[in-house]
Amino acid sequence: MSLARTAWSLVVSKAKQPRCLRGHMNKLPVVYDHSAKAWFTVRIFKNWFFNNFVSQVIRYQTQVLKVNRDQVRALLLLDNAPAHPPSSELVADHGHIHVKFLPANTILLIQHMDQGIIVAFKHLYRTRFLEDMIVMIDAEEKNVGQLTLDNLKKYNRMSVVHNIAKAWGDISISTLASGWNTLLHGTDPVVYFEGFEADNFYCRLHETGEQVKPDDVQDWLDCDEGDPGMQVLTEQEIAETVLHSNGS
């Protein structure tokens, strides 16, 4: 299940081929793409849908679920973000794999990913980040702060990509099921935060000698709460993007 999930994950950055990823582009645990300002675009989404999502759906249903090839069916539910092309442009496999958009202004209520799953992913990612960053206090080691700073300097796109893949793969089946139960049965979202609640982060940071308060940790965990995860372009920015694409 984890491998199937990470194979569909998409990471967008500015560089077409970052230096730290050279020689590894075909072996990444996620799908990597780029845009001038690291924004999610229509081009990127369509490329992911047709070249990754569709093929992975067919592979999973035929090889794992043992569905006959002509019986493969899939419906992808999406919010109506500006980076998503019209549903009429997202049809594959003779119409057997297609997209439906959720009604406007209902995302927080009926978007499956907003029922605790995105929160779980972010906490898991930050757990991985701290594991790479922090250095535990050692009686013989006096310069813990410098060692942590050195780790931060070494943290690059390769680190980000692998930690994203690991975090998404680590989301429990229970958390995913809870998201659907919330929508289908009206239950309260249950996010299985055992080991990565705010108190766990605080204790881990405190053990490294970091001078933080519990409220600081909670603010860090919630710092991107409400972030739509995309940039709404102005007309000028849209024009510049089109001209840049045609020029390349």
Image (cartoon, rainbow, N blue to C red):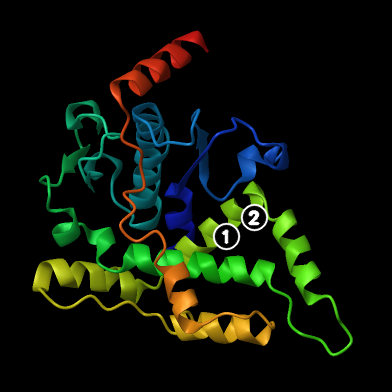
Is residue 98 in sight in this rendering?
yes
Q: Which amino acid does label 1 sit on?
A: Asn
Tell me the distance, in whole angstroms, between the alpha carbons under discs 2 and 1. 6 Å
**Residue found at the very far bottom of the displayed protein:** 139
Q: How crowded is mark 2: few (under 14 residues within 10 Å), some or many (20 or more)?
A: some
Residue 44, x across and y down, in percent: 41, 31
Tell me what residue is drawn at x 66 percent, y 87 percent. Answer: 207
| 63 or 118: nearer the viewer | 118
Is residue 197 in sight in this rendering?
no
Q: Report how many numbered discs are placed on residues in the image.
A: 2
Tell me if label 2 and label 1 are in contact, CB under 8 Å.
yes
User: Which residue is disc 1 drawn over?
Assistant: 163
Q: What residue type is labelled 2?
A: Ser
Q: For the residue labelled by badge 1, is the local secondary structure a helix, a strand or a loop?
A: helix
The quadrant of the picture occupied by the N terminus is: bottom left
Tell me what residue is drawn at x 43 percent, y 75 percent. Answer: 218
Residue 79, x across and y down, in percent: 21, 45
Q: For the residue labelled by badge 2, is the local secondary structure a helix, a strand or a loop?
A: helix
Residue 159 - label: 2
* Image-quadrant location for residue 190: bottom left
